[in-house]
Amino acid sequence: MQLIRQAMNKQLLPFESENGNYEGEATQVLVLLSNYYADKKLFDENTDGYGNILILKDSSIISKLSVIPDLLKRGSSR
């Protein structure tokens, strides 16, 4: 149970990249090694070989689930 509570808490995370820096709270961090999430293309640029970092700031499962259709729509329209 402690692990679940800890996972639901926001963590202060610093990220540095050649495109800029981010330091702030996040509940989840996804690192993608291609332009795709599952079979949906998320980015137009050819970023294969680079790490694409998606930072989710809200711990609410409802808010995370509500983002998925938007990501899938954007990915399928490209």
Image (spheres, rainbow, N blue to C red):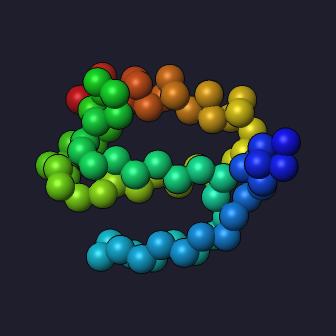
Please give the count of numbered marks on the rendered protein.
Answer: 0
Give the residue at x 27% y 49%: 33
Please state, as top left, top right, bottom left or bottom right, where the N terminus lies in the image: top right
Residue 63, how many percent across, how many down?
68, 35
Mark yes or no: residue 45 visible.
yes
Mark yes or no: residue 75 visible.
no
Up/down of 14 relative to 9, above or below: below
Q: Is residue 28 left or right of residue 50?
A: right
Up/down of 12 relative to 27, above or below: below
Q: Image quadrant of residue 75?
A: top left
Q: Nearer the viewer, residue 53 or 2?
A: 2
Residue 51, how many percent across, how many down?
30, 57
Q: Is residue 33 left or right of residue 10?
A: left
Give the residue at x 17% y 50%: 48
Q: Nearer the viewer, residue 9 or 60?
A: 9
Q: Is residue 14 left or right of residue 3?
A: left
Give the residue at x 73% y 58%: 10
Give the residue at x 23% y 29%: 78
Residue 77, how many percent across, how many down?
28, 24
Residue 47, how many percent across, how many down?
19, 52
Up/down of 33 relative to 60, above or below: below
